[in-house]
Structure formats: structure tokens, C-alpha cells
Amino acid sequence: MDNQSMQNEVILGVDTHLDTHVGAVINDAGKLIGTLVTPTTASGYQKLLAWARSLGRVTRAGVEGTGTYGAGLARVLREQGIEVLEVNRPDRSKRRLKGKSDPADAESAARSVLSGDATAIPKSHCGAAEAMRIVSVARRSAVKAKTQAINQLRAILVSAPQEIRERLWKAKAEQCVAACAHLRNLGTSTQLETLTTTLRLLAKRWLALAAELKELDSSLEKLTSQAAPRLREQFGIGPQTAATLIAVAGDNPERLHSEAALAALCGVNPLPASSGKTIRHRLNRGGDRQANNALWTIAMVRMRSEPRTRAYVERRTAEGMSSKEIHRCLKRYIVRELYPLILVDLASAAKTS
């Protein structure tokens, strides 16, 4: 038996930041052994791991922010055969009682693993799901900026001189932008020269963002067709909604041990809200809001166009359920239907990557 296997197990907890990580190690009895601050570099990760292993046998680690600041460290730890668990930030009520510091947060992360409170497996960030997430992030910001550009252009036109407004104002955004994109000169005064330049720049910005969105949509179409073909075959699911659901599931499907876990991840699982003689449930207001919105979109499309769903809506309406309640039920049913398809698509994508 080697020295590593003979050592007592210790648990590593890490509070992650942009430039530094703070690590804390506790033993299996919960006693704090030590803390260490390292830079967020490859050598810093190795230094933190070597230090933790010098104190005992490291098989588990609790890391805050495995999808952001802690992504690089989590990847290194997994490569070394260490089980990495996602740790939420400490409860605010405990912080008010005990105060806050980076070493204390790192110790709290380690104790969450020891107590069994930390059970979430981090995303691996290394496959098609991560690629879809990256494109979706860029697409959402482009949509927001494009909407902002046309709103600003229209707001300026509203207060422009009447003859200019009547000349450039169009009902459709594309026509309004086209009219402003090639403006030469609206006048010689300072106001009109500035108005000409501003309208032209906003119109060109809108056109650039439209071209960017077209490229991003093409990328999502390709990614989802290749990595999520079964999901795309389902009624009401397009490239954006498919990419959102695959991204929230992650590249490692073992994270989702049941369809109820996916429902909780998307914030559509009913939670007990009973008190006294009142027995009821409410929907989870947490979870990934982008995934929740994707399910809302799928449900809305099916409520309008799918015969099976339209029949369900009519039956539930006759029973006295409101449209909002029916929509909530549909989102939960959709998760149940899509869960096995997501698992199969992720498994197939992992084999081909």
C-alpha cells in the first residue's frame, strides 16, 4: 500500500475569484488544517493541489463558481481524479452571524462537501452544450443591442423636425433603418448635421447587428442539427430553444439523474406550499430562467398549433383551470417528454466529439 492510500482523507474547499483562489483543507472530523492563497494560473492550480495533497488524501473538493472563476481549477481537479462538487455561496444569515472572509468561505465550501449539502456535479464545459451556450450568450446580447438601436433611432425621429420625421419614419424597422442608413445631409445647421450623423450611425449599427444575428442563428442551426437531432424533431422546438435546453443540461448527462432534476434545473418543478388545512403546491421560482423561457415558448407554440396540446388545453379549461395554470402544467410535461431525448443527444454528441 502506497503512502497516498495510507493517508487520512482530507477535503478541499475553494473560494474562487478573478485573480486569486483561496483554498481551505479540513479533515474527515471537520477540523480546519490550513488555508492557502494561489493565483488563477496553471501553476497556481498545481500549487494548490500539491499543497492539499501534502496534508492528506484528497478525493473530494467543493468549488464555488465552477462555471465562471472556478472553471479552470475544476477542470484540473477532475483531470487528477478528484470528485468536484459545485458549492453555492454561504447563506446570508450565517454571514451576518459569523462575518465574511475568503478563508471562511473556502472552509464553508469544504464543510458543505463533508456534510453532504453539496451534491451538484459541475458542467464539464468541453463539448457541444458549451458551444451552444457560448453562441446563445452572444445572440442574446446582440438581440438586446439591436432592439436598443432601433428604439433609440425611433425616439430621435419622434422629436425631429416634422418634415424629417415624415420623410424617414416607417412602420417597419427594416424600412426605417434603410431610410436612415444612407442619409447625406438633412441641413446645414449644427442640429441637423448632428441629427444626420446620429441617425446614420444608429442605422448602420442595427444593420451590423442584424448581420451578426444571422451568422449566430446559422451557427445554432448547424450545432443543434448535429448535436441535438432528436430534440429538433419535436414539435415547437427550434434552434434557439434546443440550444438553451442542451446548454442548461451540460455536456455531462450524469448530472441529470432524473427528469425531476431537469425540471428543477429549469425551475418548473412544483414545490410544497402547504400550511395548516391548506394543501397546495407552487412552481419553483428559481432555476435557469433562460431554460424556463425556452419551455414557455415551446408550450405557447404547442398551445396554438399542436392538436394534442390544444385538446389538453380545452379539457383543462373545461375543468376550471386558468391559462397560466395550464401553461405551468405543460412546461412540466414538456420536460418529462424531452428529458430522455436530451440524454440520448448528449450521449451521441459525446461519442462523436
Image (cartoon, grey):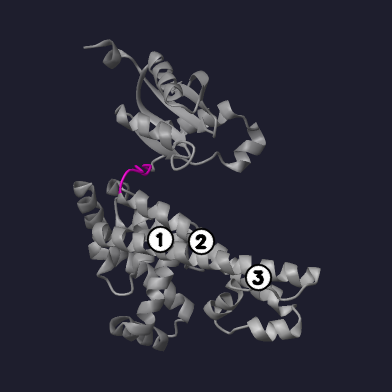
Image x and y of residue 333, in percent = 33, 69
Looking at this view, is 334 or 77 the one in front? 77
Residue 9, x across and y down, in percent: 35, 21
Q: Residue at x 42, y 31 (%)?
A: 73
Alpha carbon distance from label 1 to label 3:
26 Å
The residue under label 1 is 216
The amino acid type of the residue labelled 3 equals: Leu
Q: Are marks 1 and 2 in contact (CB under 8 Å)?
A: yes
Residue 251 circle label:
none
Mark before the other along the chain sequence, 1 or 2: 2
Displayed quadrant of residue 339:
bottom left
Q: Which mark is residue 199?
A: 3
Query: Which residue shows up at 32% across the image and 86% down it?
Result: 311
Q: Does the magenta stretch mainly form a helix, a strand or a loop? A: loop
Q: Amino acid at mark 2?
A: Ala
Q: Residues within 10 Å of mark 2 (few under 14, many from 20)?
A: some
Q: Are discs 3 and 2 less than 8 Å apart at CB?
A: no
Between 32 and 225, the one nearer to me in the picture: 225
Report the residue marked by disc 2.
142
**In this rendering, does residue 288 appear at all?**
no
Q: Tag 3 or tag 1, which sits nearer the N-term? A: 3
The magenta span reads 121-127
Residue drawn at (40%, 89%) of the image: 318
